[in-house]
Amino acid sequence: MTAGDARGPIYRDTRDLTPFGNARMQTPVRELAGSVGGLIHGVLGGRDAALIAVDGEVPRLKRMPGKAAKAVHDAIFAGKEPERLIALGRAYPGWAGLCSVMAGLLAYQHGGYLRASELLQRGLSIRNEDDANQYAATYLTRVVTRVEVAERIEVPVLFSQESVFLALSHSLRETGQLEAALQTVAGLPPSLPSALARCALAFALGRDKEVVIWTERLLNSDDLSAALLLLRGRALRRLGAHAQAHDALKEVLRRRKTDVVLRNDALTDRALLVLDNGRKSLNPRDWLRGRPAELETFEVIRKDVDERRLWEQEWENLDGK
């Protein structure tokens, strides 16, 4: 089945446990806070940011591990560069696939997307021996990769098929290979993160009908679903279905705890819808008289601007103390 063949929603995850953590919206302020927090954490004895990320403590090897397992374990959890893992893959061919995948995840964590895409693809193409697979199942389950599933939206993912393929898809997206990026995530199990990655890529490729089909009957239950609804609204707008686009954006704004970045995007998109509708009429009085929903949108935007001004004033007052 190709990336565009799905015949219905792709976001419904029926699993009891998933490898995904809570999504985080990236903004310049939050990125700066995260960098400062990471620096402080490192100074106070936390895990070095150059090392592969782990949820909790680094797992300890059991007694009498094999030579390959011991070397690979140390390279994964104590190494800061992919080269060490690449060299071990050459020294132990039965572990080459796993070593390339972990080297790719480390390169991805460091922001080296081209190299990450090459290493991850190489690792996925190599068959591991049983010892390497057993090691991965035992010791790598707490490895965490923060994946950008769509622009400005990161999701922490425990080591799994999804962490590897989502990281590869993002790496391909960063290197301009959108079609390959979409194909990479096409076979993943249904989930909100993978659905967002697929819909963002499909939208970038102009496949608006697929985005609409994949997000049917979606409700705003968290920020990932809100981001999906934004894409749905934009796809519907490009298709000319303005009423349905308005409904999707209204659902984004319905949940009060929706991230302010997503809410602002939804308000902007609603304003664009109003402008689109306004171009259909040459008589401003008729346009205003016939569109109470659009007037309501202007009122929502006005209130949002007022609230933001108050928030900025309070922030300036706090900053001045």
Image: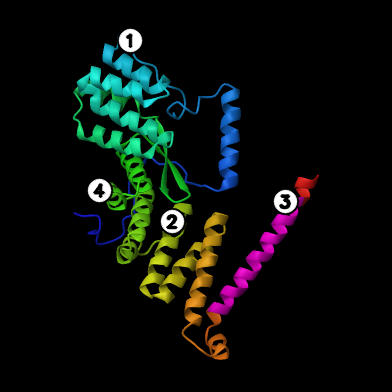
Which corner quadrant holds the C terminus?
top right
Report the predominant secondary structure element of the magenta stretch.
helix
Residue type (three-letter) at the residue carrying disc 3: Trp
Of the residues under marks 1 and 2, which one precedes in the sequence? 1
* Residue at image point 38% right, 66% down: 235
Q: Is residue 137 magenta?
A: no
The residue under label 1 is 63
CB-based contact (under 8 Å), mark 2 and mark 3: no
Which residue corresponds to mark 4? Answer: 187
Q: Secondary structure at mark 2?
A: helix
- The answer to whether residue 51 is seen in the rendering is yes
Spatial CA distance of label 2 from label 4 is: 20 Å
The residue that label 2 is drawn on is 225
Please tell me whether residue 298 is drawn above or below residue 78 in the rendered image. Answer: below
Q: Residues within 10 Å of mark 4 (few under 14, many from 20)?
A: some
Whichever of labels 1 and 4 marks the residue nearer the N terminus, that label is 1
Q: Tell me the residue that label 3 is attached to.
A: 315
Disc 2 to disc 4: CB gap under 8 Å: no
Q: Are marks 3 and 4 in contact (CB under 8 Å)?
A: no
Segment colored magenta: 294-316
Q: Is residue 258 visible?
A: no
